[in-house]
Image (spheres, rainbow, N blue to C red):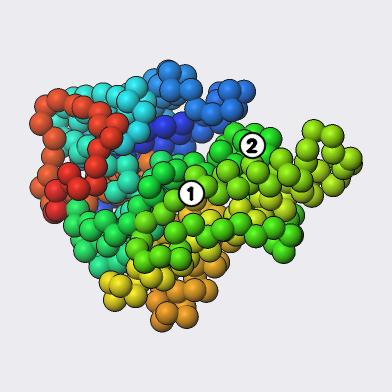
Amino acid sequence: MLVLGIETSCDETGVALYDSDAGLLSHTLYSQIEIHAEFGGVVPELASRDHVRKTLPLISEVLANVGLKQDQIEGVAYTAGPGLVGALLVGAAIGRSLAWALDVPALAVHHMEGHLLAPMLEKDAPEFPFVALLVSGGHTQLVEVLGVGQYRLLGESLDDAAGEAFDKTAKMLGLPYPGGPELARLAELGDSGRFRFPRPMTDRPGLDFSFSGLKTFALNTKYKELPDNHKLDERQVKQLKADIARAFEDAVIDTLVIKCRRAIKETGCKRLVLAGGVSANKRLREKMQEALKKEGGQTYYPRPEFCTDNGAMIAYAGWRRLKAGQNEPLRFNAEPRWKFSDLLAV
Ligand code: KG4
Ligand code: ZN
């Protein structure tokens, strides 16, 4: 079955073709970074307008890349939530109408299910069951995954998502949008011994997270070390920011690792999947792999380009549900706050 996947939930237009026999055939991604950079964050209306401009040309592009025609598509999957409502409606409207025009089934994909199943696009794909750490700009969740749609929430962030904390701390340090990868780059120049930030909620049992305090900790450290009348030169200021970035990143990574080890122990499941934008973080991947090895476990993650938003994960997740016989009625909807618990097991 040849499935077209469309992702438009936020600031990236992703389109891909997944074939159930041959695997991923073609994928393309258009990032709106330049449009939003001058505003320091995503402007929803500008995001929607750009998805309107880009989605159809990108669909033509993925087909042309592999010499296929529109009428060879056998199913269409599109992200229907969670995300920005206007942005989601663009992909949902195009995806559902295209499926209707081609007379093929359509599937409304949950964006986080896309992230969760993304490691299955890799050669070394995890088998069910596994524990998944979903770390993106909007979510931080630990989930026990028994099969597609069979998810048990083990813990989640009570306030900011990990990616959101990265982005807000980056902004406070004067780094450009998108902050997470910029902060990670700066942290590489930092000294991990200069500041030690807390590891929130690790001193009590449970698998929930809280990251908003770390952002405040970073802000207070900056004020203390860099008062208005400071005498530091440019090089010292840059080093200070790198050291704060490093302390922040160390704290987030340690906290995520501690909770994942706990989840592995509690569930008895030895496979851990890392997914979502923050799982592109190199040091997180390394530290998690090291820690899991000590537990006799194994870590799985998508290639970096499929950690952040993309069309390939949507095509794949859509195919998993289409092949189980699920499809959409002749209407479409966007679910900005779609809960995992509302998904059907297939
Ligand atoms: O999954 P994603 O592309 O979009 C959402 O579904 O939210 O995740 C984006 C998030 C942003 O907060 C971004 O700053 C963060 O992932 N991110 C990173 C890195 N790359 C992306 N955070 C830390 N280190 C990175 N290398
Ligand atoms: Zn995402």
- Quadrant of the image occupied by residue 97: top left
Do the residues bearing badges 1 and 2 touch, measured as CB atoms within 8 Å? no
Q: Is residue 225 left or right of residue 313?
A: right
Q: Which mark is first along the chain, 2 or 1? A: 2
Give the Cα distance between marks 1 and 2. 15 Å
Whether residue 105 is visible: yes
Q: Quadrant of the C terminus?
A: bottom left
- Using the image, determine if residue 157 lies above or below residue 47: below
Whether residue 303 is visible: no
Disc 2 secondary structure class? helix
Residue identified by numbered label 2: 172
Q: Nearer the viewer, residue 209 or 336?
A: 209
- Quadrant of the image occupied by residue 78: top left
The image's mark for residue 63 is none
Image point 55% across, 40% down: which residue? 167
Q: In this view, does 304 lie to the left or right of 78?
A: right
Q: Where is residue 171 in the image (x, y as percent from the top left)?
A: 62, 36
Q: Position of residue 144 (x, y in %)?
A: 27, 62
Disc 1 secondary structure class? loop
- Quadrant of the image occupied by residue 105: top left
Q: Is residue 280 left or right of residue 172?
A: left
Q: Which of 44 and 34 is in front in this view?
A: 44
Binning the other alpha carbons within 10 Å of mark 1 as few (below 14), some (14 to 19) or many (20 upward) gives many
Kind of residue at disc 1: Phe
Residue identified by numbered label 1: 211
